[in-house]
């Protein structure tokens, strides 16, 4: 991406000593900054007329600037330069607009989550924590009891089963697509339907697992493994797509060299192709885990809701971090004093975000650590 | 499966007897093929099991269905609500997403573009329940004065007719939260395609004296148009199926035209809110609703994929 080569020569400030004819029809350097300052002032005045607030001020100032600056530029440099500057400012404005919610989300989670982050949250479950306990805590008669330990246990075990099922299936499918189906109709239709599967709404995946186990075991079959099946449906396409991309970039020369030495195809795949691509595959799997670990909707319909610790994925209801957050916010433990529940929810949200970020970071580190060069091949 | 492979793996290459090797080949090929077919089968199973569990609803008489007027009049308002929420999100997110992608690919200095791209990817990784929690506690409250202003000044448009919700938990808030959630999808995909624009086209345009925007309009956008369309379709698919943000943010109700009052409901949120307590026919009703949602998103995604596939054939990039 050579942005430098795209920058137009005319927009760079002319060096001192140039003949003035070359800078004719160019906006003076002070023009845009002056318009920016004026826009802030005018924005403040307009905001004061309507009823002052910081957000309104910022919006009005931005609008005034986005109108005034291109008009001024086109008056000096012509209509084409005016349109160019309008788009430039719009692009910057869009970027700022897109970053604001991200900062707001992160700030909200940090500000609300950090106070609730304590050993209670990490090491105790909600077993025995009732509205009365929360009322007492809100009245100042004791600490906020109860935590998310059972939810962390649920998240870990359900994600474990989902990974255990989806990684082999996803890996083998990607191997079939890249190494075996040489553009055959089966390969093409698998690729197409894997793409379509990427778009399955997560709640539909949950309903599928619920319907499947409902037919097999009766309508109220809800336990951790059902949720793991739902997450597997969501995880497989990600694993297949990532692995496929990685296997595709393994140079054909490596395979041909192996074949030339008389190595069988399956050994070539296991000993040459996969080790070369392992960094990308591992980071792809990590990203897939990061994606499903935050899923909420499929768990609502498959795993039920528990307040006690349950390590067994094959019987009994389970709670995961996302469903814990959801229920703590939507139906506080004590309806009259939702604050303790809110505190637990935000602290759990902070833990969840930290896990997801760590997994993303881990994916990058894994990609770097297992890079083919370092493997000595 | 793994045991067969590891024992065969451990034998040295030279001792790889022809028969054993051949067996390994066919076993490995068989497993790969099996996994691929399993994926096709599981997608078929999703449709099949949803249909089987939904069957009682389609056979039930109209009075037994929630609302008492049959399944279609039960599901219809929610289909509309789902489409409205997704459309608001698309209308907001498409221009911003494409402009941010342009910022990363053509405007920002490379030193800034890379971290910004990473941050956008992180935005996509934040779980939806956290966006929902943020939307219901922070955004909804912040939008209340804006909605009051909208009803006061634009109330004559049915979309903004008052009285505005006092909590801000309305369809428009849902649309904005969804827009924030799908923005990274549009940005990430558009950026990938913007970067692939042939450098020679761009430089030719600049050499002919085009300004940066003219260069983008003449070379980058025509090249990337199919990619932008398909990224928007994929984002639409995501917005249609999004559950948690809607379930947490919207205070739902019957279908209303106004976007700034509480009311309306989406299919996904209806399922999430009612499934845990449902049994019998109600359970089947909700699964039928899920089947409808599955079909809608399936169509949207297939159109998007078809555009991408068509685009790949004609693209100059490969």
Image (spheres, coloured by chain):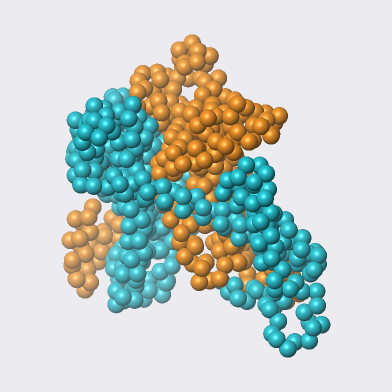
Chain colours: A cyan, B orange
Residue A361 horizontal/vertical position (percent): 35, 61
Residue A227 seen in render? no
Residue in the foreground of this view, choosing between B81 and B313 = B81
> What residue sits 45% from the left and 28% below the top?
B270
Residue at point 60%, 26% (across, down): B163
Q: How many marks?
A: 0
Question: For this view, does A71 lie left or right of residue B98?
Answer: right
Q: Residue at x 37, y 71 (%)?
A: A255
Residue A77: give x, y in percent of width and height: 79, 69
Q: Position of residue B266 (x, y in %)?
A: 51, 31
Quarter of image, res B10: bottom left
Hey, which residue is sitting farthest bottom in the picture? A17
Can residue B197 be spotted in the picture? yes
Q: Nearer the viewer, residue B16 or B162?
A: B162
Image quarter in which the N terminus of chain A is found: bottom right
Quadrant of the image occupied by residue A336: top left
Residue drawn where x is 47% and y is 17% of the image: B66
Q: Is residue A303 left or right of residue A92?
A: left
In this rendering, is residue B246 above or below A115?
above
Which of A40/B77 is in front? Answer: A40
Quadrant of the snapshot with the C terminus of chain A: bottom left
| Image location of residue B304, percent across then percent down | 57, 47
Is B184 situated above or below A281? above
Q: In the displayed structure, would residue B96 be above or below residue B15?
A: above
Instruction: Classify residue B258 as left or right of residue A317.
Output: right
């Amino acid at each position: 991406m050579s942005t430098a080569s795209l920058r137009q020569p005319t927009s760079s400030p002319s060096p001192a000593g140039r003949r003035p004819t070359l800078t004719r029809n160019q906006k003076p350097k002070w023009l845009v900054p002056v318009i920016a300052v004026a826009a802030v002032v005018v924005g403040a005045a307009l905001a004061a007329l309507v009823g002052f607030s910081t957000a309104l001020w910022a919006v009005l100032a931005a609008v005034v600037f986005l109108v005034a600056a291109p008009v001024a530029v086109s008056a000096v440099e012509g209509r084409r330069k005016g349109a160019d500057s309008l788009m430039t400012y719009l692009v910057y404005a869009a970027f700022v607009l897109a970053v604001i919610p991200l900062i707001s989300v992160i700030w909200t989670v940090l500000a609300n989550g950090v106070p609730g982050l304590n050993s209670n949250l990490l090491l105790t479950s909600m077993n025995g924590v009732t509205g009365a306990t929360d009322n007492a805590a809100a009245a100042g008669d004791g600490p906020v009891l109860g935590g998310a330990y059972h939810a962390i246990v649920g998240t870990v075990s359900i994600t474990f089963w989902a990974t255990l099922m989806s990684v082999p299936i996803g890996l083998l499918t990607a191997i079939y697509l890249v190494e075996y189906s040489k553009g055959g109709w089966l390969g093409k239709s698998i690729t197409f339907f894997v793409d379509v599967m990427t778009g399955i709404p997560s709640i539909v995946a949950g309903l599928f697992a619920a319907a499947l186990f409902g037919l097999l075991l009766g309508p109220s079959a809800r336990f951790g493994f059902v949720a793991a099946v739902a997450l597997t449906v969501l995880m497989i396409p990600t694993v297949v797509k990532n692995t496929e991309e990685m296997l595709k970039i393994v140079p054909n020369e490596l395979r041909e060299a192996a074949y030339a030495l008389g190595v069988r195809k399956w050994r070539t795949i296991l000993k040459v192709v996969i080790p070369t691509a392992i960094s990308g595959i591992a980071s792809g799997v990590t990203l897939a885990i990061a994606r499903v670990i935050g899923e909420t909707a499929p768990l609502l319909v498959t795993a039920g809701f528990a307040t006690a610790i349950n390590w067994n994925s094959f019987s009994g209801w389970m709670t995961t971090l996302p469903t814990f957050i959801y229920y703590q916010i939507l139906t506080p433990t004590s309806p009259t004093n939702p604050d303790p529940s809110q505190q637990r929810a935000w602290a759990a949200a902070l833990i969840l975000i930290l896990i997801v970020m760590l997994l993303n970071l881990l994916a990058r580190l894994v990609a770097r650590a297992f890079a083919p060069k370092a493997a000595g091949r | 499966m793994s045991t067969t492979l590891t024992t065969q793996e451990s034998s040295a290459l030279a001792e790889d007897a022809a028969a054993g090797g051949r067996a390994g080949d066919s076993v490995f090929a068989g497993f790969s093929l099996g996994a691929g077919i399993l994926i096709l089968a599981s997608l078929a199973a999703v449709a099949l099991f949803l249909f089987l569990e939904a069957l009682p609803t389609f056979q039930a008489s109209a009075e037994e269905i929630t609302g008492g007027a049959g399944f279609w009049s039960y599901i219809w308002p929610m289909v509309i609500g789902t489409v409205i929420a997704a459309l608001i999100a698309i209308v907001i997110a498409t221009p911003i997403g494409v402009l941010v992608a342009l910022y990363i690919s053509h405007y920002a200095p490379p030193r800034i573009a890379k971290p910004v791209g990473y941050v956008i990817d992180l935005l996509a990784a934040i779980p939806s329940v956290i966006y929902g929690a943020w939307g219901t506690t922070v955004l909804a409250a912040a939008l209340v004065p804006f909605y009051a202003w909208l009803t006061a000044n634009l109330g004559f448009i049915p979309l903004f007719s008052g009285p505005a919700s006092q909590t801000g938990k309305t369809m428009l808030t849902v649309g904005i939260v969804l827009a924030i959630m799908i923005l990274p999808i549009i940005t990430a995909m558009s950026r990938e395609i913007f970067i692939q624009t042939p450098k020679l086209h761009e430089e030719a345009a600049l050499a002919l004296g085009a300004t940066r925007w003219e260069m983008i309009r003449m070379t980058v956008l025509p090249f990337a148009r199919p990619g932008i369309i398909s990224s928007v379709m994929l984002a639409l698919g995501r917005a249609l199926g999004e559950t948690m943000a809607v379930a947490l943010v919207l205070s739902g109700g019957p279908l209303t035209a106004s976007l700034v009052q509480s009311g309306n409901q989406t299919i996904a949120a209806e399922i999430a809110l009612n499934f845990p307590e449902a049994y019998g026919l109600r359970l089947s009703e909700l699964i039928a609703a899920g089947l409808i949602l599955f079909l809608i998103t399936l169509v949207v995604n297939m159109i998007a994929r078809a555009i991408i596939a068509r685009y790949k054939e004609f693209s100059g990039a490969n």
